[in-house]
Image (cartoon, rainbow, N blue to C red):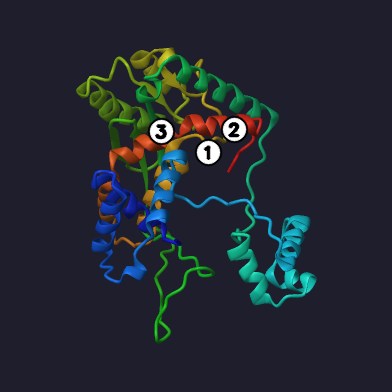
Amino acid sequence: MDLELSDKILLLECYINGGKSITNAIRAFCTEKRIKNDRHKPPTKSVEYLINKFYETGSLLKQKPPGRSSNDFFIEEVQSHVEEFERNVSVRSTASAVTPCKSTVHKILRNSLCLIPYKTTLDSKLTDNAIEERMEFVNAFLSHVAADENFLNRVLFSDESNFDTNPRINKQNDRIWAYEKPVACGTKEQYPKKVCVWLGITTSFIIGPYFFDGTVNQTTYQDMLQKLVIPELKRRRKYSSVIFQQDGATCHTSRKVKDFLLHHFGENRVISRGFPFKWPGYSHDLTPLDFSVWPVIKAKINARNFSSINDLRDAIDAEVAGIPQDYFRACIMAVPERCRKCLEKKGQRFE
């Protein structure tokens, strides 16, 4: 089953809203997508696999599966070629080396080996200090989880992300299926309007989204904490128990904000740089907002253009409100397993 991310999200929502029944989820999904032909319905086993994968990893994004061995000669040859050269392996070069035609090599790579053609990307190399920080954090986090069965329910994970009224079109990969060539597939503003969004999630409730007007600095960030986070925690009677998590952005770790957090939470209920429970840098693979929540929201928001910031804000509000609380809970519950993967990789990134 090869579904778009938006369809996977819809299937998950149908599963949760349908009493966590696979049958009800498929029925509701087909109704929403107006699917009447049984051949086009998602298979039960595929949906079950998708749901189990989400509850295990906290993510609906595709992960690169390992290659599978086979007795077929050409499959073994293609797999051997890919493993030998590792980088910059094209279908054309593989076909020249192994002898089958390009279409056969493409089928082997896609269908038999289940490989995905990722683009080469550059990422900042983790320093020894960053690796050490990640190891210290995951060990401390897992210790807290083991010592307190309610620990994960107390953590308020938070993060910001930027959204654009005119998201960029991928001219290389995006395609329009039509009988005639479109005159234009979109417009591009020279200086598109952007908005920075803050969101906080726990296993039982969320806070936000909160939209910053202009640049996020220590003053605007503290104002958000003062006007939104603290009152909301008091209203929910979580003020004295919640553990506040934030990353190491400069506006988060200024003396002004640190004093504010110390006053309201104390040094033992903050996970952040500059506190005893230190959040490690370069750790997007460990915070649920980065590894699961933001990608889900952006998959829907970035598929559209907006005429104004207000329209963009309304759309983000609607997308966040449409995500079931069980989704946020599953994302947070997947953090310990991700910490274990980080340990297995000895502090290196694992995805």
Mark 1 and mark 2 in contact (Cβ < 8 Å)?
A: yes
Residue 215: tell me if it is visible: yes
Q: Residues within 10 Å of mark 3 (few under 14, many from 20)?
A: many
Residue 343, given in percent of the width and then of the height, sits at: 61, 29
Residue behind mark 1: 285
- Mark 1 lies on a secondary structure that is loop
In front: label 2 or label 1: 2
In the rendered structure, which amino acid carries the disc numbered 3?
Ile
Distance between the Cα atoms at labels 1 and 3?
12 Å
Residue 187, given in percent of the width and then of the height, sits at: 40, 70
Q: Nearer the viewer, residue 24 or 107?
A: 24
In the rendered structure, which amino acid carries the disc numbered 2?
Cys
Distance between the Cα atoms at labels 2 and 1?
9 Å
Return the disc, 2 or 1, that comes first in the chain's sequence: 1
Residue 128, given in percent of the width and then of the height, sits at: 70, 29
Relative height, residue 127 to residue 44 (above, below): above
Residue at horizontal 65%, vertical 34%?
345
Q: Quadrant of the N terminus?
A: bottom left
Q: Nearer the viewer, residue 228 or 318?
A: 318
Mark drawn on residue 332:
3
- Mark 3 lies on a secondary structure that is helix
Choose top left, top right, bottom left or bottom right for residue 219: top left
Q: Nearer the viewer, residue 278 or 349?
A: 349
Return the disc, 2 or 3, that comes first in the chain's sequence: 3
